[in-house]
Amino acid sequence: MNVYDFYIPIYEMFDGITPLSKDCGKLCDSACCKDGEEKTGMLLFPHEEKLLSNVPFAEIEDSNCEFGEKEVAKLFFCEGHCNRKFRPLACRIFPLMPYLKNGKIKLIMNPMAKNICPLARSLKPKDLEPAFVKNVKKAMNRVLKLKDGRDYILMLSEIADDFTSLNNKFTK
Ligand code: SF4
Ligand code: SF4
């Protein structure tokens, strides 16, 4: 299956399906689309860069994270606006992320979202729109079927753990 056939049906799962039934961007002035002082960017799922490499509203760069057999994860930097049809999967599932523990995948609030997202700070995944949570689960199950999908989710989980332990050190 090519990257287009893999990702477009996953993208379509999030057409009109968002974390809340109302537009949560109104709660926070779409904080997750704005860079703070530091340029951040969204990590792309495996091979997603092949689909998004020509979108005019963003740039893709190598991150310093690796997964699988030395595959370098890519970062997607937008200008704070996008053609929503081509927003990356990480934007569609935000503020959730897949997390691998003891060989099992679950969905968690992305700990890195907590600094910017009021939903991530105050709610649990089960409090979000059921159709959204269901489709994030479905999407992650499809990612798991990729050869390097599990390794990618393991990498994300390790990044989340590192962030949480660093954050705990500074907030003690
Ligand atoms: S930061 Fe959170 S509440 Fe705000 S638009 Fe993004 S997902 Fe919605
Ligand atoms: S690609 Fe779109 S949805 Fe994702 S952060 Fe940029 S503006 Fe927001």
Image (cartoon, grey):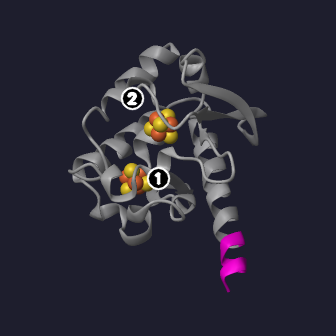
Q: Is mark 2 within 8 Å of ligand 2?
A: yes
Visible residue check, residue 89? no
61 to the left or right of 147: right
Where is residue 144 drawn, in percent x and y? Answer: 50, 38
In the rendered image, residue 168 lying in the magenta stretch gets the answer yes
Magenta region, mostly helix, strand or loop?
A: helix
Where is residue 142 drawn, in percent x and y? Answer: 43, 34
In the rendered image, residue 36 lying in the magenta stretch gets the answer no
Amino acid on which the number 1 mark rests in the picture: Ala
Q: Of 168 and 25, which appears nearest the observer? A: 25
Residue drawn at (35%, 40%), measured in percent from left and top?
A: 138
Q: Which residue is mark 2?
A: 84
Residue 124 position (above or below residue 73):
below
Looking at the image, tell me whether mark 1 or mark 2 is earlier in sequence order.
1
SS at mark 2?
helix
Q: Of 141 and 163, which appears nearest the observer? A: 163
Amino acid on which the number 2 mark rests in the picture: Arg
The magenta region covers 166-172
Residue drawn at (27%, 48%), measured in percent from left and top?
A: 23
Q: Which residue is mark 1?
A: 31
SS at mark 1?
helix
89 to the left or right of 58: left
Q: Is mark 1 within 8 Å of ligand 1?
A: yes
Where is residue 145 drawn, in percent x and y? Answer: 49, 32
